[in-house]
Amino acid sequence: MAKTKVAVTLDTQTVRRVDRLVRDARYPNRSQAIEAAVAAQLKRLEGRRLAEECGKLDPAAERALAEEGLGSDAAAWPEY
């Protein structure tokens, strides 16, 4: 995948923590450590957004949509 160079400003404590990860051979360099951290945070935020949107759903309306068109087959399904 193509990469784009960006400049970021981090507090000294964060840089020390990143450097510790590099020193402990968890990542080969600062850039890869920061890239992994940003990617992980984005994934968490995207997952949280999906959960928040799902929380807005009306269970009764969703059930009605799911059962729409089942007709006589609906009687054979177990209760929720």
Image (spheres, rainbow, N blue to C red):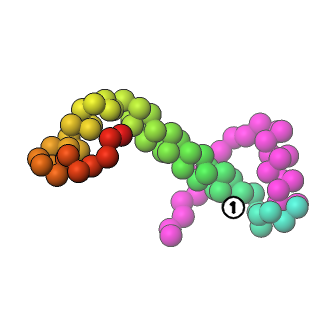
Q: Residues within 10 Å of mark 1 (few under 14, many from 20)?
A: some
Vertical side of 58 occupied by 33: above or below: below
Left-right relation of 32 to 58? right
* Type of amino acid at the residue the image marks with label 1: Gln
Residue 48 image offset from top left, x and y in percent: 50, 39
The residue at 83%/39% (across/down) is 13
The residue nearer to you, when weighing 36 against 72, is 72
The residue at 46%/39% (across/down) is 51
Residue 76 image offset from top left, x and y in percent: 23, 51
The residue nearer to you, when weighing 79 against 52, is 79
Which residue position holds label 1? 32
| Residue 30 on the magenta segment | no
Quadrant of the image containing the C terminus: top left
Q: Is residue 31 at least partly visible in the picture?
A: no
Q: Which residues are magenta?
A: 1-23
Residue 40 image offset from top left, x and y in percent: 61, 51
Q: Is residue 1 at least partly visible in the picture?
A: yes
| Residue 17 on the magenta segment | yes
Left-right relation of 52 to 11? left
Left-right relation of 31 to 38? right
The residue nearer to you, when weighing 56 against 66, is 66
